[in-house]
Amino acid sequence: MHHHNVRLQDNIEAVSPPSLAAGPGGAIALSDSSGDYLLSVISPEGVVQGSQDDSVYYGLTFSPDGDSLYTVSSNNRVDTWVRTAGSLKRVATHKVPVVADTRLTGVAARRDGRVVALRTDGSTVLVDPSTKGDPPQVEDSGIYDSQRDHRGALGEDGTLLAVESERSLANSKTSHVDLLELPSRRRMRRIGLGGALSTLAVSVRRHSLFTVIDENVLQSWDTRTGKLRWQSDGAGYAGIAVDPSGHWIATVSGDGTVWFWDSATGGRLASVDIPFAAGSRATSLGTGWESSIAFSDDGKQLWSATEGGELLSWDMTTDSWIKELCGRVSRQLSPAERSRYLTSVSGDYQACGPSDR
């Protein structure tokens, strides 16, 4: 675990996990939803910030080249930001139509330069950040059903949407997820999960839909065929993140335990605990409900941000783990220790000491 000297304030009015996104070149975008409403980008070059005015950003994403940051806010805006002269500058604002009982909840940047924003009812808005006018035009999908509690997730490139479409009966144990092609919203297929959906994520690069059902079971679905690849018990249900390189899945439970999974097999590999912040409401609500997680663009780190806590990063490579292990023991490992700690994923590492590569 690594500290980055970035503290987040504690919102005493509502549970509101900070918005968190990873971008190219090791950049991290973070929105603190309390206090001074600051939007921050942390990168190897330093920290830059921009004012959020009176809005809360529920979704953040970088453009594919990392030059722009897109945000969706509580006042139904899609904003475009760029880093200039040591600060974040808002260069475009697109107001989207207001739909009762919904808000914007997610955003993804397409390779064609447009941006997809997702509402809590499963409808989408397509924005071209370069368009001008008063107000700039947006393309609204116009499909609303605010009477249902939709959970949705956008693919990282804005070409695919997975949205909870129905339950067979109120409070039933069965959920269905529709996979929709964007921007047309043509339904590619419907997947019956066999349980009540807790959280979900889509990886276009891995042709995968990951779902947690019944607050316990992690599932992997092939988005091309709709077939279940595997399912595993013991998942966290308060959040999910997928490693862009395809190795890992992370789930977080209400108490702040983060479990790591092999995305190919569903094997549960390890866990870490997001630390409680002294005096934070998380001590009673659970850190997981006030935390967001995201993998770095290269998959080598997992980032976590906790309201009332701080921004942390966690090493996610075998090399870093073995270096940490060897740094702790500072000697050659015994045969029993090698068998226990240096497993098949350790490659040609055999011991700690001068003989290591």
Image: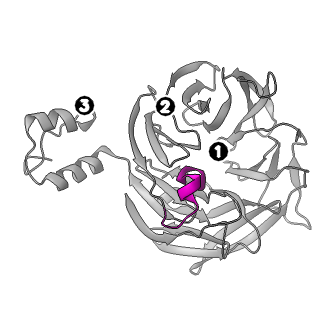
Q: Secondary structure at mark 3?
A: helix
Nearest the camera: 6 or 246?
6
Of labels 3 and 1, the one closer to you? 3
Q: Earlier in the sequence, mark 1 or mark 2?
A: 1
Look at the image and say whether residue 87 sits in the magenta stretch: no
Instruction: Decide: is 85 above or below 297.
Output: below
Look at the image and say whether residue 287 sits in the magenta stretch: yes
Q: Residues within 10 Å of mark 2 (few under 14, many from 20)?
A: some
- Label placed on residue 157: 1
Q: Quadrant of residue 76?
A: bottom right
Q: Which residues are magenta?
A: 277-290
Give the residue at x 40% y 50%.
300
Identify residue for label 2: 234
Give the residue at x 69% y 60%.
70
Tag 3 near tag 1, CB within 8 Å: no
Q: Secondary structure at mark 2?
A: loop
Amino acid at dot 1: Asp
* Residue 156 point in image, percent of width and height: 62, 44
Give the residue at x 90% y 66%.
133
Amino acid at dot 3: Ser
The single residue placed furthest to the front in the displayed view is: 284
Q: Earlier in the sequence, mark 3 or mark 1?
A: 1
Q: Earlier in the sequence, mark 3 or mark 2?
A: 2
Q: Secondary structure at mark 1?
A: loop
* Residue 23 point in image, percent of width and height: 54, 57
Identify residue for label 3: 344
